[in-house]
Image (spheres, grey):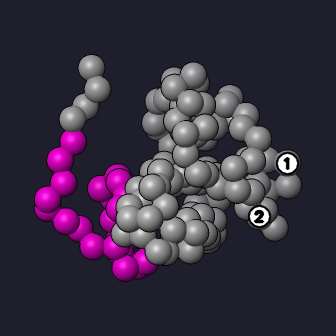
Amino acid sequence: MKINYIENGELDAEKIVSIFSSVGWKRDINTICKAFKGSYYILAYNGEDLVGFARAISDDYCYTGIYDVIVVPELQGKGIGKQLVTLLMEKFKHTTIYLTYTEEKDTFYEKFGFQKINNAMRMLKN
């Protein structure tokens, strides 16, 4: 298996939504397409098949946020997610990087040096 990583490649919204669904996350196709277009993202392909992705939003000077690091379940544990995060960290190493994650994945991110913080807040959209 040879995985190719493509930065800001052509988006196939249906494939993106399908990968979200594969891990139990529901995403609206129009909303997620706009979110990706407003982000820096990396797509992971196994041949012609999209098998994962990760995206970041950055001011490219001070702060970067990493979001939606997802690999299809059957290929998790093969280093694809690790490479996606590594590529984003390298791209934005000159900034302070924050990320959101699902609770059971905290140990995955701790291996990169991320630390939990208590001083974050959020406001959900209506």
Report x, y in % for residue 54. 56, 54
Report x, y in % for residue 108. 41, 70
Q: Tell me the SS state at disc 2.
A: strand
Q: Is residue 97 above or below residue 49?
A: below
User: Are there few (<14), some (14-19), or many (20+) residues within 10 Å of tag 1?
Assistant: few
**Is residue 70 visible in this depiction of the protein?**
no
Q: Is residue 14 above or below residue 96?
A: above
Which residue is rendered at x = 49% and y = 61% of the image?
Answer: 60
Most distant residue in the right direction: 47
What span is colored magenta in the figure?
Answer: 98-122
Indicate whether residue 102 is drawn in magenta.
Answer: yes
Residue 24 got which mark? none
Residue 20 falls left or right of residue 47? left
Mark 1: amino acid: Glu
- The residue closer to the viewer here, 10 or 19, is 10
- The residue closer to the viewer here, 86 or 18, is 86
Image quadrant assignment for residue 107: bottom left
Which residue is rendered at x = 44% and y = 65% of the image?
Answer: 61
Q: Tell me the SS state at disc 1.
A: loop
User: Are there few (<14), some (14-19), or many (20+) residues within 10 Å of tag 2?
Assistant: some
Indicate whether residue 10 is drawn in magenta.
Answer: no
- Residue that badge 2 annotates: 3
CA gap between label 1 and label 2 equals: 10 Å
The prevailing secondary structure element of the residues shown in magenta is loop
- Residue that badge 1 annotates: 48
